[in-house]
């Protein structure tokens, strides 16, 4: 399939940036073109996004990390969220998602786009539902046309990828709502659409009007991130009928989107026990025709509030080894509150650790080279080299600051194993 011929905006973007992408990803140009044409890779990049650096997602390109930010009705403000955006980018996030649900969402989105040179994603349904919730009205009152209008509005603003919950149907919500699922529907977008379907006794308008969605996305090269509205919100729900029926529907929609020249990613499971992670990833990739897979975690246990970034990093590392292309971070605030700046930074670093661990296991040259450089620096007690090579150089600097003039670390001092093993005369520190 020659996908690029069906999307002229994407074709122009690829030709403009192919050389830089090849260098950044350590891939041959032909391999990138083959990945894009097959749909196994996507190039995030809406030409309406000012100052954008287009980003390639899909293994064997480097595994990417996304950070979610956004205003809340109970906490935060636009200045705070813009500061978090800077923190996330400084910590190494490859993309950002604006999940704002309070305030002037158009203004917030425009400001984020202007300050973010990396791809920016959204969940467009939040903007539609906010208009009703802010007035104390049931969000199920929205009209199907409003969803299409909001997709077009955000595409014209420059949003690069959108979570669209196209796989929610009248049939599969029964499995999530009318069974003994421990956590029901935990996706905000999924729950809003499920409520709309029940209240209106109609099919999901994103599904019935999918052709209109595709026309807009192709025009602006907006990548559809197929939302996992029925993802498991508890480990015991992983792999149930609701989850898999939605995945199968998303696979069918991926084929339709590719035929129309629209790029797609799949959003993956949330809570999955550790021994099931890799099987879930491989099955999802197969059912969705190897579309890039974008996962939240997965969290391998449910009992780690305050430390869900660690649970998610364990799952993320396993998922990368099994074929996941894109990790969405979790922060220590997950399930508890809105993350602050420190939470955002810790979440990004945790997901980058997961990506590095997975890529080392896969034998990716850039990941192995980072490990070799760290080993060399440690053997030489080269602290500037360790800082330069570390995933979080600022942490190395912070931990060393009180003993920066010492050759060995402050834990070992004269007991330093590296110094002891050197073939040289022992001398006490001066």
Image (cartoon, rainbow, N blue to C red):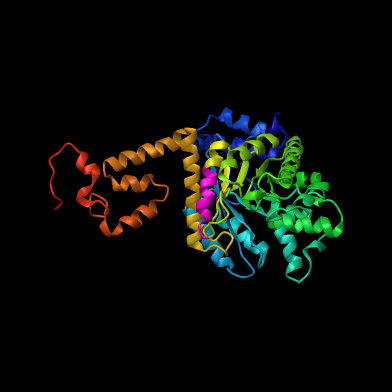
Viewer can see residue 248: yes
Left or right, residue 138 beside residue 30: right
Q: Residue furthest front?
A: 180
Q: Quadrant of the N terminus?
A: top right
In terms of depth relative to the viewer, which is nearer, 276 or 295?
276
Q: Residue at x 23, y 47 (%)?
A: 416
Q: Residue at x 45, y 38 (%)?
A: 367
The residue segment tinted magenta is: 306-317
Labels in figure, total:
0
Viewer can see residue 324: no
In terms of depth relative to the viewer, which is nearer, 265 or 231?
231
Q: Quadrant of residue 260?
A: top right
Give residue 147's position: percent from left, percent from top: 77, 55
Q: Quadrant of residue 325?
A: top right
Considering only vertical position in the picture, is 19 above or below 246? above
Assess whether residue 310 is covered by the magenta stretch.
yes
Q: Residue furthest right?
A: 201
Left or right, residue 260 beside residue 24: right
Give residue 7's position: percent from left, percent from top: 71, 37
Left or right, residue 306 beside residue 214: left
Considering only vertical position in the picture, is 140 above or below 318? below
Prevailing SS of the magenta stretch: helix
In terms of depth relative to the viewer, which is nearer, 365 or 236?
236
Left or right, residue 156 beside residue 314: right
Assess whether residue 12 is covered by the magenta stretch.
no
Q: Residue at x 86, y 58 (%)?
A: 200
Give residue 251's position: percent from left, percent from top: 73, 38
Q: Quadrant of residue 385?
A: top left
Give residue 61's position: percent from left, percent from top: 54, 36
């Amino acid at each position: 399939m020659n996908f690029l011929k069906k999307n002229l905006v994407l074709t122009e973007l690829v030709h403009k940036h192919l050389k830089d992408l090849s260098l950044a990803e350590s891939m041959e140009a032909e391999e990138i073109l083959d990945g894009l044409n097959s749909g196994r890779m996507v190039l995030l990049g809406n030409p309406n996004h000012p100052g954008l650096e287009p980003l390639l997602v899909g293994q064997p390109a480097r595994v990417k990390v996304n950070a979610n930010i956004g205003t809340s009705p109970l906490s935060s403000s636009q200045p705070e969220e813009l500061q978090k955006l800077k923190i996330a980018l400084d910590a190494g996030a490859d993309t950002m998602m604006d999940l704002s649900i309070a305030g002037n969402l158009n203004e917030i989105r425009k400001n984020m786009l202007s300050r973010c040179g990396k791809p920016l994603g959204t969940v467009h349904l939040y903007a539609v539902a906010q208009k009703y919730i802010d007035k104390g009205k049931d969000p199920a009152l929205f009209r199907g046309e409003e969803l299409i209008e909001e997709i077009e509005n955000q595409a014209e603003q420059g949003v690069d990828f959108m979570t669209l919950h196209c796989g929610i149907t009248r049939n599969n919500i029964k499995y999530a709502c009318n069974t003994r699922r421990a956590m029901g529907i935990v996706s905000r977008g999924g729950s809003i659409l499920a409520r709309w379907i029940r209240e209106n006794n109609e099919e999901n308008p994103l599904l019935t009007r999918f052709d209109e969605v595709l026309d807009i996305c192709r025009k602006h090269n907006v990548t559809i991130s197929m939302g996992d509205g029925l993802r498991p919100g508890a480990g015991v729900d992983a792999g149930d009928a609701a989850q898999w029926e939605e995945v199968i529907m998303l696979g069918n929609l991926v084929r339709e989107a590719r035929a129309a020249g629209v790029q797609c990613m799949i959003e993956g499971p949330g809570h999955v026990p550790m021994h099931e992670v890799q099987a879930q990833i491989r099955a999802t990739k197969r059912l969705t025709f190897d579309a890039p897979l974008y996962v939240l975690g997965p969290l391998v246990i449910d009992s780690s509030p305050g430390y869900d970034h660690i649970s998610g990093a364990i799952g993320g590392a396993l998922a990368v080894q099994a074929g996941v292309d894109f990790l969405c971070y979790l922060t220590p605030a997950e399930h508890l509150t809105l993350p602050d700046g420190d939470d955002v930074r810790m979440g990004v670093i945790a997901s980058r650790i997961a990506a590095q661990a997975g890529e080392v296991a896969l034998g990716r040259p850039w990941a192995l080279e980072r490990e070799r450089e760290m080993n060399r620096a440690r053997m030489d007690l080269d602290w500037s080299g360790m800082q330069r090579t570390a995933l979080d150089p600022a942490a190395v600097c912070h931990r060393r600051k009180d003993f920066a003039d010492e050759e060995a670390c402050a834990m070992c001092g004269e007991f330093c194993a590296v110094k002891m093993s050197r073939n040289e005369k022992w001398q006490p520190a001066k």
